[in-house]
Image (tube, rainbow, N blue to C red):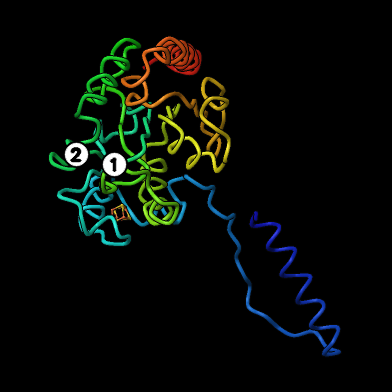
Amino acid sequence: MTGSDKQILYAFLNAAEDSLDGHRKARPAAEFRDDPAPGSPSCPETGRFASLGEVERAVMGCSACPLAAARTLTVPGEGPQDSRNARVLVVGEGPGADEDASGRPFVGKAGQLLDRMLGAIGLSRQENCYITNVVKCRPPDNREPQPEEASACRPFLEAQIGLLRPTLILALGRTASQSLLSTSEGITSLRGTWREYRGIPVLPTYHPSALLRNEGLKRPAWEDLKEFRARLDSLAGV
Ligand code: SF4
């Protein structure tokens, strides 16, 4: 709600109260501000953290969901810490065994494929792209995160997005896409179609693990990446 809407509502309620009481009451001047835009630096989730480093430290100490019990290391995310450099955010599902052991996202076989895919369109976690997951702790046996685990971890992802304010988001696989976009649509229909997360364009595509299991998905995934690069070029050079 905007500050002026709040002011109008406040005046209306005061007038109604005065009318019921039969006299006009003196009240201190009230100041109203616009609600913060979600994902903006003043969004409550973002406001809890001053930097990505703070988010990472909070993740390391988090035990807000059952995934904390079995993890070796938390996997907050990796990439440039400065929003001027990290113009792209890549969101996956959750850490696997290699990530759980190293504390770094996408370092196993799927991660190496992801690095090659990103490299092919001029992106890398060293220079211009921050990589994270919906949940920051490994789900046992690489199962999908439960909805309550994803929602417990959501404030961290929201804060990362708010602090980075990426130009574009690449959502890897069904879980990340559905979670970010709050939809139950399947990845087959989501992939390659531009969606939005709080004003930021999001392109869902296949998870690199799916590409390792099914070679036939590599071609459509490559088409998605080329589309992603073209949109990025049209918005701002990375
Ligand atoms: Fe906390 Fe997220 Fe790990 Fe759950 S998955 S313990 S919410 S950091």
- Name the residue rendered at 75%, 85% in the picture: 25
Q: Secondary structure at mark 2?
A: helix
Find residue 227 and report its horizontal and vertical position in percent: 49, 13
Image quadrant where residue 216 sits: top left
Q: Residues within 10 Å of mark 1 (few under 14, many from 20)?
A: few
Asked whether 132 or 146 is in front, the reply is 146
Which residue type carries mark 1? Asn
Asked whether 64 or 228 is in front, the reply is 64
Horizontal side of residue 129 vs 233, given as left or right: left
Q: Secondary structure at mark 1?
A: helix
* In this view, 38 is above or below 93: below
Horizontal side of residue 138 vs 145, given as left or right: left
Find residue 27 and report its horizontal and vertical position in percent: 67, 80
Q: Which residue is mark 1?
A: 142
Find residue 70 and report its horizontal and vertical position in percent: 20, 55
Q: Which residue is mark 2?
A: 97
- Name the residue rendered at 26%, 25% in the picture: 110
- Label number found at residue 103: none
Image quadrant where residue 131 sits: top left
Which residue type carries mark 2? Ala
Compute the Cα span from label 2 to label 1.
8 Å
Q: Is mark 1 within 8 Å of ligand 1?
A: no
Cβ atoms under marks 2 and 1 closer than 8 Å: yes
Horizontal side of residue 92 vs 232, given as left or right: left
Assign the N terminus to one quadrant of the image: bottom right
